[in-house]
Image (tube, rainbow, N blue to C red):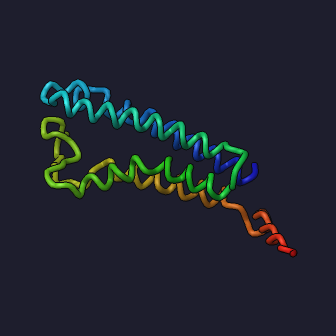
Amino acid sequence: MNTLFAARCLFTINAVGIAIGGFVADWNASHIYNPRWPPHAKFHDGQTMAFGVLLGAATLFFAWRRSGDRRTNILAAAFTGGVTLWAQAAAFAFPGVAWTDPEFLGPGQSLHDFAPQIYFEMAVTFVVLLASWLAWPSAAERPVPAEPALVTR
């Protein structure tokens, strides 16, 4: 198996994960069906789930795209494949946020614990970096820049 194909497979796994991950995590009583959540909070949850589907589609598009600059396609696939989870990780920096609601804590869990989502975010980051590294063209594969045209009078 060549490295470009392996990278595309990793990007595909990532894309499917981000497209369905929001639904797996949020289509339940702790999120979209939580009676304590106001409609506007549910709107933002729906927005986040839809965003995952759109980013998953964009990741697939750039990972398998055969036209255009390969390095640009790789960077686009990496960005679209990681941005939603990197934004989730950044959300912990905002005041008053928690990784779950108190009524959904398991035995021995605390809102001050290390958020379990961070492990998933680190795994996705690893997959995106590995896929990018595998797909990145070697110096021998890079196109040679065209010579500038000579201007004659």
Q: In the rendered view, tell whether residue 60 sits above or below residue 92.
A: above
Relative side of 17 to 103, left or right: right
Residue found at the far front of this picture: 153
Q: Position of residue 46 (x, y in %)?
A: 32, 30
Relative side of 87 to 33, left or right: right
Q: Quadrant of residue 75?
A: bottom right
Q: Quadrant of residue 92?
A: bottom left
Q: Nearer the viewer, residue 121 or 44?
A: 44
Say which quadrant the C terminus sits in: bottom right
Q: Which residue: 71% across, 61% down?
A: 137
Q: Position of residue 64 (x, y in %)?
A: 66, 42
Relative side of 153 to 25, left or right: right
Q: Position of residue 21 (x, y in %)?
A: 41, 36
Q: Which residue: 26% across, 30% down?
A: 43
Q: Nearer the viewer, residue 30 or 95?
A: 95
Q: Which residue: 30% across, 48% down?
A: 116
Q: Which residue: 64% across, 46% down?
A: 8
Q: In the rendered view, tell whether residue 98 sits above or below residue 71.
A: above
Relative side of 37 to 4, left or right: left
- Mark count: 0
Q: In the rendered view, tell whether residue 51 sits above or below residue 98.
A: above
Residue found at the far right of this picture: 152
Q: Position of residue 17 (x, y in %)?
A: 48, 38
